[in-house]
Amino acid sequence: MSTDAVHQHQFVSLNGCALPVRSRCSYLRREPFAVGIAFQVERGQWVEWSFARDLLVAGLSEPAGIGDVRVRPDLSVDEDYLILELESPDGYAVVEMLREDVERFLDATIALVPLGAEEDHFDVESLIDEITNV
């Protein structure tokens, strides 16, 4: 049996929140360069972000990202955690994720689409159709 997507739910620590926040990581074969992460802010309401899978991979070993999304290992406090910083005009968030969870998620995405093989799974024609039919 073949699958076209990877989804993983986990609890993460979000700055300013006393309790862990439910999160959902996702990866779609038809969007091979991107990963998605969503945070449940209320029952049935999620805030979603999408960014490059390569950024998440790079952030496992060193600080990565210069824009709205930055990823880095938390070597100063606890190497078992990965720090995800998200910034938008609406606010700023620091998310602590268990490194083991992120590695398991990335392993599943790589099993679906190996690193470096993203172009083989990317449908340029569909993207052009989507952009031009807005």
Image: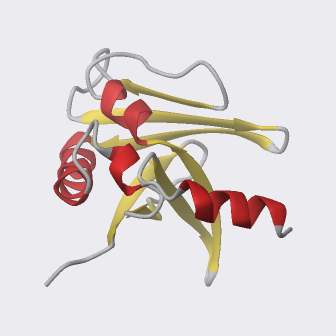
Residue 35: % across, % down? 45, 52
- Please state the horizontal and vertical placement of residue 125, each as a whole percent of the image: 60, 60
Q: Residue at x 37, y 63 (%)?
A: 29
The percent position of residue 51, horizontal first and vertical second, equals: 54, 43
The quarter of the picture where residue 20 lies is: bottom left
Left or right: residue 59 versus residue 40 is left
Query: Is the residue 5 above or below the residue 106 in the image?
Result: below
Residue at 55% x, 62% y: name it.
39
Instruction: Tell how many labels.
Output: 0
Expressed as whole percent of the image width and height from the top left, the position of residue 14 reads: 52, 48
> Vertically, is 99 above or below 134?
above
Q: How is the image coloured?
A: secondary structure
Residue 97 or 67: which is nearer the viewer? 67
Quarter of the rendering containing residue 92: top right
Residue furthest to the front in view is 125
Check the image and report above or below for 7 versus 80: below
- 38 or 130, nearer to the observer: 130
| Quadrant of the frame with the N terminus | bottom left
Quarter of the picture holding the C terminus:
bottom right
